[in-house]
Amino acid sequence: MAAVQELEQHLGDPADPGRLISCQRSTDLDQREQFPDAECRELDRLGIPAHYAPRAWGGALERLDTSAELLRVVARRDLSLAIAHGKTFLGCVPVWVGGDDDQARRLADDVVRGAVVSWGLTERDHGGDLAAGDVSAVRNSDGYVLDGEKWLINNARRNHLACVLARTSPDPGPRSHSVFLVERAALPSGAYVPLEPERLHGIRGADISGFRLHGAPVPATARIGAEGHGLEIVLKSLLLTRAMCAGLSLGAADHGLGIALRHATTVHRYGRPVIDLPQTRRLLADVLGDLLLAEALAVAAVRSVQALPGEVAVTSAAAKYLVPTLVQQALTRFTELVGTRSLLVGATFADACLQKLHRDHRIVGIFDGSTVVNLHALINTFPFLNRSGPGYDPGSGPRSAALDAAVRRDAELPPLDLRAVELVPRRGAALLAAVPAAAATVRGLAGAPGVPAELVELTAWLAGACAAIGTAAAARRPAARPPADDFALAQEVAGCVAGAAALHTWLANRHLAGTAAAGPLRDDALWVRSALARLRARATRREPAVAAWRDPLVEAVAAAGDVSLLRTEPTGRGVHP
Ligand SMILES: Cc1cc2nc3c(=O)[nH]c(=O)nc-3n(C[C@H](O)[C@H](O)[C@H](O)COP(=O)(O)OP(=O)(O)OC[C@H]3O[C@@H](n4cnc5c(N)ncnc54)[C@H](O)[C@@H]3O)c2cc1C
């Protein structure tokens, strides 16, 4: 991931107001509700758009985890900027998933040269109910004519292209819509009318509005995939983009944690740094455990797109539900930790970044499928979660080679093939299916150096929880409008997927030579114990008053004074998990 380190170095310290992408400038732009134009140009100059287009078609994208990590590096400095710039990647994915070589090559060429691409899915009256969309595309002898309004759309006013989901059949059903890549410059005047910008409580400088299409003619070659296959292409694309969105949340978490740590270690109360107050320490420890769990899930989800493309329906929905949820809760707790200063406007405290971050991050749980939509997506996988019988091949050992690639940081990933993702996890989910074997491995390690009894106990609990959700999910009946109880079960499923990701990640990487920063977190399985302990506390709604991992975890992070400690396991290349 040399590109990630290079970007980190190029962008430098965001606390330095002399940097183009600095906290001071981003809160200033936010207060003036001004788009980060210069910052976007800088990311273009640094070649970031090439990482939005697969190498096979002329871009630089070979591994999705690298692109997610690049988004994280930007989000760690300014989440608004990461969303404004990264949206082009999301807008392109339907073409990478459903377009032909010629369409993909032409779009890749445009994107590498800095074209801005919007994703036009939702409509004012239909929100997440994409199959109800009214924007129409009517076929004629030259191609199609598009009519109707898309709202809310990121970069609708400044884009060059938009991927638009439009109705090609008046009949309801899964074959009612198609995807079109609309090139604004090729349209007659008045055919694409951007709507007035909406003012927002978060990502205030972003360009969020919509557009109206008035008899917009597009050639037949603008249609992506076969007519009527639009919903399928969009749903597959969302599996990828939802996994990628976790990178935005991780960047926000890094940023928030940095601010909270600085406050906790430099502000003194009752004669000691705030971090020494028992309640502050516990708050920090618990949030760190949550963030480590979020990180393990996020990384496994994005790597799964290449390693386990048949199972992304589970991992991606779990990540898009749980990672933004945990990170938003963490940001709320950081404002609690910082207290008064978190409410101040201006330069008095951390350039007022924490309140901006708290507002900005809310959008990650809304766009690309809201939290509830992703829980619904997980409910749709219930009939498949228990599959580990005939037809399912979890591999010869506790982890198959494919699962290994999803979690082992030095494992090669299979070549990027965005068309390989499957909407239905027919063979189940390897992350879950391999938990009993992983728990048995940990049991066998009991008493070995670095494997405390608490870890053995936590993994046994996780194995039990995974078995229970598998049985419960298999007993649920599929329904177009699932009962509320199913959503509660989906939350438990997401937790188990996250716990499984953490457990496999720990087992797969514990022998790798650690980076200096990873050391203290790896001692006595500290990071995975804290992640699993937090998961169990949430699931059982029982918070242990005393937990052996809390003090060492906080001390390890405070001593490093560096949020890179959150990078749970080394990659073998010295970068994030
Ligand atoms: C800042 C911002 C930027 C955006 N950018 C884009 C963009 O670039 N492109 C784009 O296409 N869209 C974009 N959107 C739109 C965004 O994706 C939608 O807001 C999102 O789809 C939710 O729509 P909605 O708020 O109308 O609510 P819906 O998701 O439709 O929800 C309405 C109500 O129904 C419930 N509900 C919905 N679905 C389910 C379900 N499956 N199960 C149970 N309950 C459900 C919800 O809980 C809620 O109470 C953006 C939105 C914002 C705020």
Image (tube, helix red, strand yellow):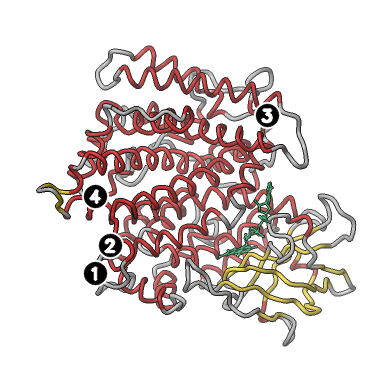
In primary-sequence order, the first of circles 1 and 3 is 1
Residue 467 falls in which quadrant of the image? top right
Residue at 50%, 18% in the rendered image: 436
Residue at 53%, 18% in the rendered image: 396
Query: Between marks 2 and 3, how big is the CA–CA gap?
Result: 48 Å
Tell me if the residue at label 1 has its CB under 8 Å from ligand 1: no
In primary-sequence order, the first of circles 3 and 4 is 3
Query: Between marks 4 and 2, how big is the CA–CA gap?
Result: 21 Å
What residue is pinned by disc 3? Answer: 384
Q: Nearer the viewer, mark 1 or mark 4?
A: 1
The single residue placed furthest to the left in the displayed view is: 271
Residue at 64%, 43% in the rendered image: 420
What residue is pinned by disc 4? Answer: 562
> Compared to 540, does 171 lie above or below?
below
Query: Between marks 1 and 4, how big is the CA–CA gap?
Result: 22 Å
Q: Are marks 4 and 2 in contact (CB under 8 Å)?
A: no
The single residue placed furthest to the bottom in the displayed view is: 189
What residue is pinned by disc 1? Answer: 348
In primary-sequence order, the first of circles 1 and 4 is 1
Q: Which mark is residue 390?
A: none
